[in-house]
Amino acid sequence: MPNETITSRRNPKILSAAALADKKERDARGLFAAEGVKLGEELLAESVKIETVFYTARAQDKFPQTLAALCARAAERY
């Protein structure tokens, strides 16, 4: 999966995703964050729009099929 690599915790995409921990931010943006393979698989089973997928090299090695499916549905992948 040739996607952009994020190397800084201060990356605007990371900060934007982290802001979703706040309920007011989630409500204002109409978004939520789902973390982990199990929740990713549940999202794939639903007709949910996936905005962004963040993943590690380790996750890519352990769960290549799930990640490929999530990335195929996501607008952005990191």
Image (spheres, grey):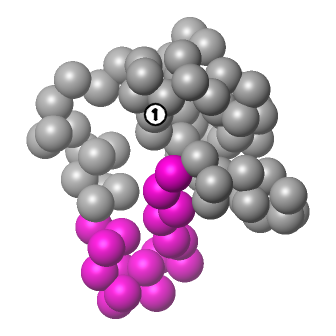
Magenta part of the protein: which range?
A: 19-36
Q: Which residue is mark 1?
A: 55
Direction top: furthest residue: 2
Query: Which quadrant holds residue 42?
Result: bottom right
> How many numbered marks have been drawn onto this rendered protein structure?
1
Residue 28 is a magenta residue: yes
Kindly tell me whether residue 49 is visible in this rendering.
Answer: no
Characterize the local packing of mark 1: few (<14), some (14-19) or many (20 or more) Cα atoms within 10 angstroms. Answer: some
Q: Is residue 45 magenta?
A: no
- Residue name at image x 53 percent, y 71 percent: 31
Left or right: residue 47 compared with residue 3: right
Residue type beneath disc 1: Tyr
Rendered-image quadrant of the N terminus: top right
Determine the residue positioned at 56% across, 24% down. Answer: 62
> Which quadrant would residue 19 be assigned to in this image?
bottom left
The C terminus lies in quadrant = top left
Q: Compared to 68, does 37 lie above or below?
A: below
State the image coordinates of residue 59 (x, y, percent, origin top left).
49, 29
| 13 shown above or below 15 | above
Residue 60: tell me if it is visible.
yes
Residue under the point 73% across and 51% down: 41
Q: Residue furthest front?
A: 62
Q: Secondary structure at mark 1?
A: loop
Q: Residue at x 15, y 39 (%)?
A: 9
Image position, residue 21 (x, y; %): 31, 73
**Residue 56: percent from left, percent from top:** 40, 28
Q: Is residue 30 above or below residue 54?
A: below
Say left or right for 76 vs 28: right
